[in-house]
Amino acid sequence: MMDREYQPAEVEQRWAEEWAKQGLFKAQPQSGRKPYCMVIPPPNVTGDLHIGHVLVYTLHDIVARWRRMEGRDVLWLPGTDHAGIATQMVVERELAKSNVTRQQLGRVEFEKRVWEWKEKYGGRITDALRKLGSSCDWSRERFTLDEGLSLAVRNVFVRLYEDGLIYRDRFIVNWDPIFHSAISDLETEHREVEGKLYTVRYPAAAGGSTEIVVATTRPETMLGDTAVAVHPDDERYRDAVGQRVSVPLTGREVEIIADDFVDPKFGTGAVKITPAHDPNDFEAGRRNKLQELVVIGEDGRMTEAAGEAYAGLDRFEAREKVIADLRKEGLLLDVKPHRHSVAHSQRSGAMIEPLLSTQWFVRVKPLAEQAIAAIEDGRTRFVPGNWSKTYFEWMRNIHDWCISRQLWWGHRIPAWYCDACEKVVVAEQTPESCESCGGALRQEEDVLDTWFSSGLWPFSTLGWPEKTEDLERYYPTDLLITGHDIIFFWVARMVMMGLKFMDDVPFRDVYIHGLVRDEHGEKMSKSKGNTIVPAEVQERYGTDAVRFTMAILAAPGNDIPLAPERMEGYRAFANKLWNATRFALMKIGDETPKPWREEDLSFADRWILSRVEATQVQVTQAMERYRFDHAADALYHFVWHQFCDWYIEMVKPEFQGGSAGTAAAVLLDVLSRLLRLLHPFMPFLTEELWHKLPGSESYIAVAPWPESNEAWGDAKIEGEMELLQELVVRIRNVRSASNIDPGKRIRVLLHCDDPAERLLVETQTGLLSPLVRAEEIQVVEKFPDGLVAAKGVAGKVQIALPLEGLLDLDAERARLEREVEKLRKDLAGRTKRLENASFVEKAPAEVVQKERRVRDDLTEQVQRLEGQIAALSGGD
């Protein structure tokens, strides 16, 4: 006997263990079935899963389970990402609790600690994915730092280097002064800050007569100025170009140059040029062959090149001292508030310092050209398609990719330096000595950007660079599901790397989902206290309810405002299905009913078969278009509003009468089909119910997806059922409005001039009667004169519920008249107020509008009650 309420916790754990034990989700290359492959967007080993992970992995799992039921050989390959800078940050914070730094531990011991962290949290993440129901092939789980993927990374690095696409040079980079590492543009976020705009006078150089005034937001970088620039078309400075001025506080003389990048409208139209500390200045410096002075170091402090008075000061302390010194020398002309956008590190939160640094880079443009063409010609498709525009915009304006990071956790760059002859050796395996002079080699200390290894994920996880069976069979993969926030970080790089090393795109479709936000549309963060912890909501509402919530809200590309309370409704939905199945099994029993014959089908049977057929088609088409929200919505409405609210209620009398053989067979057929349609969305509940159905075989996780049966479709029956449903709802409403005791049986009189509708109603009175608790339903030519009845209309069908014997007519009439009198007084007051011109003119528009709405509602209530009073008096 089934419990009265669905208890998800016990069910979920039991089926997760059973699925794993049976190995149901292992890919089967030898099966002969058509392959279908997805690689998991690997979660970082930095902690627990967040609610955004729940969205993306739920959508992946829906597809994996659906395609598996369709008969495909599904490989959903799981794994985790070492997440260099993020993981190192977390582990360093843990060490700091014991007052230990990584420098104190040394590189080898620190890496050991990070591996321990990975083993702990990598296991927790895998466990969380299993609890979510993720039907991955766990036998193929990978990690971006495992031996095979590390070999792939080294192979790619060497080949790109040999092709001239990886190089080492000194360029300006985004420097994180907390982590002491370069980071990419994509790892920064621009924040609006309240800064200041300083106007500074640069005196004429010795023997010169030209001085110039510049505006800057970073006066401390002035100590590294090597030129002042103006726009070549700026008439104000035509005679100044080529003259020399003195950089304040330094005594260094620099030239005034002309360069097109200068905005004549900003500040004074003259800008200071600090090539080592500003990207635009860097480019201008290279164009004009300017000296590059590094005056801010990797720790965010001023270097000796900044001068004795400032060396060692924090960059912001130096700013205050520079301002004070400028003011003292009479060179600070003005200070104004200036709100502007400043880059910050996403990980540490520190303000980025543009810094001249020697780094490793990928020459991206040749790779990007192929990746652009692959999307243009449709080899890979974005869903929704508008995200391809975002992809193109970035790819067509792409800059070389700085891939080196000054970290200890990650793929160490496979480059070695010979100090004796200064040769650089790049190789997959550690060389014994310098091939040129035989001298000792030291390996590059830097590691690779995490996204370098992630860019190889679709083929490195399948065994590349070896030509494995999996690689041959499952590459390119079929689908990637990911957020729009990492189109540049990850999607574009996978496309570039796949085309370069596999000569094919890494996936055929890219489905872009939105970001999960709080119920007000705000970004979730621990500091705001608006995060949702997956484990907590899974425990509270059940995993299936959480999954269904994510699916039904997942409109492609749109962000998802999520209140945990939304999950409560889908917990109730799970319980509704549980109880519907419980009812069905109590009525059907343990024996499988005999197959139904078409000639024995009732009106209700034919209707529900038509509806489940239409739902199957709707769900399948929605899944093909990746409209998981439409598929979930169709299933929700079928289960709740058609199967439970109508069909089960319509067939209850048949079971009570003991002649329910056909209804039992139809009920079982519909349940079987319904559970399979729902399985990708609610795997635990459907597996549990599947095994309770008489005659069910194996596991629903590998049961066949329902096929369309056009013979079940019946548009005529569905149209007729709509009229009958409208009639039932209207009778119930009239009954309720007339204050008739819900437990009493009523007489119903119906009149209809349309012959077809009249015939339908006449033949289905037996279906209608139990649904409205009617002891009798009569279809009449006309209503009797003087009939005291509650009346209504459903389409073309007129309804009358005779009230004699159901109500104390005099008492009910008196009650209604009292209620009408009360409403009329309120209505009169509102009307008088609205007729007052002074109120209408002076009151806020929203107040006046509200008053009008209330007046209209009161008018409608009065009219409705007056109609009921007339009905009690035998009037129309």
Image (cartoon, rainbow, N blue to C red):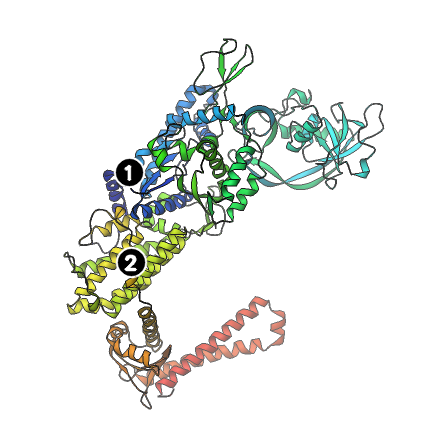
Q: Nearer the viewer, residue 37 or 329?
A: 37
User: Which secondary structure, mark 2?
Assistant: helix
Tell me, yes or no, whether the two marked residues, 2 and 1, touch with CB atoms within 8 Å: no
The residue tagged 1 is 28
Within 10 angstroms of label 1, few (less than 14), some, or many (20 or more) residues?
some
User: Which residue is at the far bottom?
Assistant: 785
Q: Is residue 42 above or below residue 567?
A: above
Tell me the distance, in whole angstroms, between the alpha carbons under discs 2 and 1.
Answer: 36 Å
The numbered mark, 2 or 1, whose residue comes first in the sequence reads 1
> What residue sits 65% from the left and 24% below the top?
295
Quarter occupied by the C terminus: bottom left
Question: To which quarter of the image does residue 53 belong?
Answer: top left
Q: Nearer the viewer, residue 553 or 592?
A: 592
The residue tagged 2 is 576
> What residue sits 33% from the left and 32% below the top?
469
Amino acid tagged 2: Lys
Per the rendering, the mark at residue 546 is none
The percent position of residue 760, horizontal first and vertical second, equals 29, 77
Task: Select label 2 or label 1 by which is in front.
Answer: 1
Question: To which quarter of the image does residue 208 belong?
Answer: top right
Within 10 angstroms of label 2, few (less than 14), some, or many (20 or more) residues?
some
Q: Nearer the viewer, residue 232 or 266?
A: 232
